[in-house]
Image (spheres, helix red, strand yellow):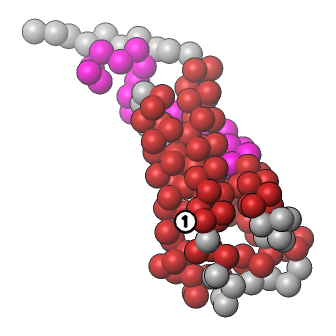
């Protein structure tokens, strides 16, 4: 029951800056998974950019932003719930380009519909979820006094 939780349930699980760093780490995990699956295909192809460096910077900026959004929006919860929400973020990251692909990614949306890209997106979400669990375990607990009838 949430009333019996040993922490304030309206607090985010991560500080926004921790979420930003978690997003960068999850972006790195996604890049690594994608690079292995695509035999080191540059991520710039996914962004329609000709230069791999610009693609890497664009991806890391997007990953940091997504981690920041996760950090400020995810409230404290049980570890399995945090991992579940992280996986949902990964699935959303896989579905969003299919919906908005031509608008943001140009003509190079073929890679975004592949199974390796799906696995890379799951790696992103799973990394966020695991880092959220670690952030919650390192956080000090505050006890709330709740009057009971």
Locate the C terminus and report the quarter of the image it occupies. Answer: top left
User: Residue 78's x, y, as percent?
Assistant: 42, 27
Q: Is residue 81 left or right of residue 137?
A: left
Q: Mark 1 points at which residue?
A: 94
User: Which residue is depicted at the point 55% across and 55% down?
Assistant: 90
Is 7 in the magenta?
yes
Locate the N terminus and report the quarter of the image it occupies. Answer: top left
Image vertical order of residue 5 relative to residue 45, above or below: above
User: Which residue is depicted at the point 60% across and 35% down?
Assistant: 130
User: Which residue is depicted at the point 64% across and 65% down?
Assistant: 117
Is 126 in the magenta?
no
Image vertical order of residue 105 relative to residue 144, above or below: below
Residue 4: quarter of image: top left
User: Which residue is depicted at the point 69% across and 85% down?
Assistant: 108
Image vertical order of residue 90 relative to residue 109, above or below: above
User: Residue 61's x, y, as percent?
Assistant: 73, 62
Which residue occupies the extreme left position in the image? 149
Which residue occupies the extreme bottom position in the image? 107
Residue segment shown in magenta: 1-26
User: Residue 39's x, y, as percent?
Assistant: 83, 65
**Is residue 50 in sight in this rendering?**
yes
Image vertical order of residue 104 relative to residue 145, above or below: below
Density class for disc 1 (Cα within 10 Å; few <14, some 14-19, many ≥20) is: many
Q: Is residue 34 left or right of residue 65?
A: right
Task: Please tell me which residue lies in front, 18 or 128.
Answer: 128
Q: Is residue 80 left or right of residue 140?
A: left
User: Residue 64's x, y, as percent?
Assistant: 69, 55
Helix, strand or loop under label 1: helix
**Is residue 14 in sight in this rendering?**
no
């Amino acid at each position: 029951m949430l009333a019996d939780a040993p922490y304030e349930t309206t607090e985010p699980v991560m500080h926004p800056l921790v979420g930003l760093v978690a997003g960068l780490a999850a972006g790195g995990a996604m890049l690594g998974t994608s690079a292995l699956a695509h035999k080191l295909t540059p991520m710039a192809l996914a962004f329609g950019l000709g230069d791999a460096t610009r693609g890497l910077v664009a991806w890391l900026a997007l990953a940091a932003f997504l981690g920041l959004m996760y950090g400020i929006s995810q409230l404290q919860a049980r570890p399995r719930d945090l991992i579940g929400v992280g996986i949902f973020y990964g699935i959303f990251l896989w579905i969003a380009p299919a919906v908005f692909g031509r608008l943001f990614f140009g003509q190079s949306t073929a890679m975004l519909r592949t199974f390796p890209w799906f696995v890379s997106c799951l790696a992103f979400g799973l990394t966020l979820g695991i880092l959220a669990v670690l952030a919650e375990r390192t956080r000090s607990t505050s006890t709330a006094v709740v009057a009971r009838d």
